[in-house]
Image (spheres, rainbow, N blue to C red):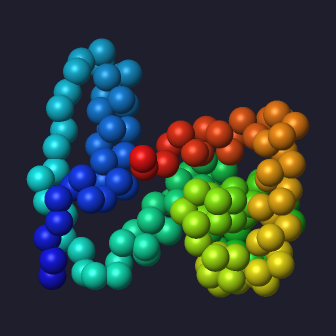
Amino acid sequence: MNWIQVNDLPIVKAIINKAQASIKKATGAEVSLAVVEYPYVNGDRKEAVKDFVKSMICNYFKVNWDLVTGKCKEQNYVDARWAYSYLMVVVYKQSFKQTGRDLKKDHTTIMHAVNEVNGYLEMKTDYSNKINELIKMLPE
């Protein structure tokens, strides 16, 4: 097992920042949370990022991941699928093929999702506001 500094894991920093902001909002008190080191096995960082994004998407859209990766066509599941596709491909530079594997979809479906989200972002719709909120929630 390797030990790395928390600065090397933006996910942990984001969680700490979010927790500090939540505590300040709830109590009005400034707090300082810190994690000195975090153990991970080589290669698990990508999985940690995916897990973080999956969790964030499920919480934000209030959906179950199994239904996101399924054939459900309800709008909130489609929105969650498209958001995951966009974040993983555009923000985290994951391939269409790998993102398709994550969602149990063909890579062309992922390409369509990313193109649709880009269109919504250009039009400044409610969905584009959701995507921008999600991007702000991501680790730096």
Q: Which residue is at 86% across, 49% downward? A: 119
| 82 w.r.t. 107: above or below | above
Between 140 and 55, the one nearer to me in the picture: 140
Q: Position of residue 99 (x, y in %)?
A: 65, 76
As drawn, is 35 to the left or to the right of 45?
A: left
Q: Is residue 58 visible?
A: no
Position of 120 relative to 49 (above/below) = above
Residue, x 77% and y 72% (percent of image)? 110
Where is residue 66 drawn, in percent x and y? 64, 74
Q: Quadrant of residue 18?
A: top left
Horizontal and vertical percent for residue 45?
36, 72
> Image quarter for residue 127?
top right
Q: Position of residue 95 (x, y in %)?
A: 64, 76
Q: Is residue 61 left or right of residue 47?
A: right
Q: Residue at x 37, y 46 (%)?
A: 14
* Picture layout, residue 132 above or below residue 95: above
Instruction: Specify whether residue 9 is in view.
Output: yes
